[in-house]
Amino acid sequence: MEEPIRILWVQPVAERGGSDLALLRTLRSLPRDAFECHVVLPSVGPLTPDLAAAGAIVHVVPMRRITSGGGLRWWVRYLLAWPFTVLRLARLVRATGAGVVASNSLHTWYGWAAALLTRRPHVWHAREIVVQSGAALRLERYLCRRFATRVVAISDAVATQLDGTNVVVVHDEPDPGEFHPGAAGRFRRKLGIDDEQPLVAAAGRIDTWKGFDVVLDAYERIKRVRPDAGLVVAGPPVEGKEDYAAALERAATELGARWIGPYDDMAALYADADVFVSASTEPEPYGLVIVEALLCGTPVVATDHGGPPEILARAEADCGLLVPPRSPADLARALAELLPPTTSTAQRRRRRPLWRPDPPGTAAVYREVLGRSSS
């Protein structure tokens, strides 16, 4: 029997969102009999039990994800600690017998050096569109081109910012067994929302660029023509943005919208919505919440930049509308166009999924990097 492919994943944050959840989905897509996954986290975090349940062996090495908010002192500490962190990762590569090193974000700069020291191939998973710093993007382009055997971009929008010939696009795909129209009914029943109220839903981590303020402005406008329409917003605040999220929550409450914070049963939320909205003011690298909503048969209104245009282009006909970013008037018009005249659990359960998932592609990348066949 052939030895499993051993991967050492370098995951720079230990939260429950963004690249963390993307890594969890990737691990679940890899056949357990063919892959042995080791995940290095900077600390034990809320996702650690889920990673272990997915079959990963978790290790802890203190490290940091690059951030545009770091001051001079932050950068000095980062640079002083960087070589020691790389050496610890290199020792871990050898100790685990990993055949390949994987970096789970453009903004983690340790994995390429650990792979170089141990003479392992390096796979860099690019999950960001870099708009915060031109200098960081230029450096990350160079590192990906020079020190990655393969760069796995989450979308064409992410791939176009990188200029190497080693870039391949592999989309994240939700589980159709979890996200489907049949989940309708649970969410409204749990929150006491009228089954016949037309409902707009927005979800994601609450950050300044996610456009939840635009959603609230659009909701105020749409209530003038559809006073029966409801709005629910779900998601936790990004660390450091708690005051911003609290201000939005107050504004939502004044408008009569429901601000529910973190929510676990997202499939039920999507399936019970009549329209899902993603109003990011900066380009989304992909937009997995959009794909999840489409699988539940829920049409989508999204901003016309980054990953959402390619998602809607791949989706079924009549899947939704694109609007300019930062335009509550356009967003309100699109929502008014897509909201149905009537709704019910029975109607929502009869909707057809608006998305056809791609077959998993990550395993093929790692087999190709190591010269392995799938047989």
Image (cartoon, helix red, strand yellow):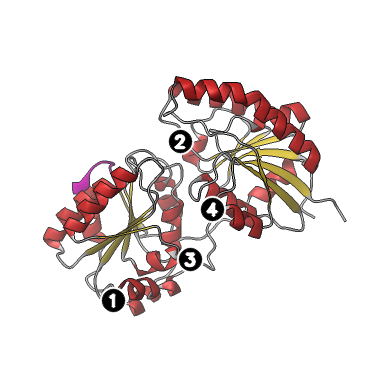
Q: Which residue is mark 2?
A: 129
Quadrant position of the N terminus in the picture: bottom right
From this view, report whether residue 68 is shown above or below residue 23: above
- Left or right side of 43 for 67: left
**How many C-alpha atoms fall within 10 Å of the one at disc 1: few (<14), some, or many (≥20)?**
some
Disc 1 marks a residue whose amino acid type is: Asp
Which of pointers 1 and 4 lies earlier in the amino acid sequence? 4
- What mark, if any, has residue 195 been given in the picture? 1
Q: Which residue is mark 4?
A: 46
Q: Provide residue 18's location: percent of width, then percent of height.
A: 48, 46
Pointer 4 with pointer 2, Cβ within 8 A: no
Pick whichever, 333 or 4, lies toward us: 4
Q: Which residue is mark 3?
A: 179
Disc 4 marks a residue whose amino acid type is: Pro
**How many C-alpha atoms fall within 10 Å of the one at disc 2: few (<14), some, or many (≥20)?**
many
Which of pointers 3 and 1 lies earlier in the amino acid sequence? 3
- By secondary structure, the bulk of the magenta-drawn segment is best described as loop
Q: CA distance from mark 2 to mark 1?
A: 38 Å
Q: Is residue 268 magenta?
A: no
From this view, report whether residue 30 is shown above or below residue 105: below
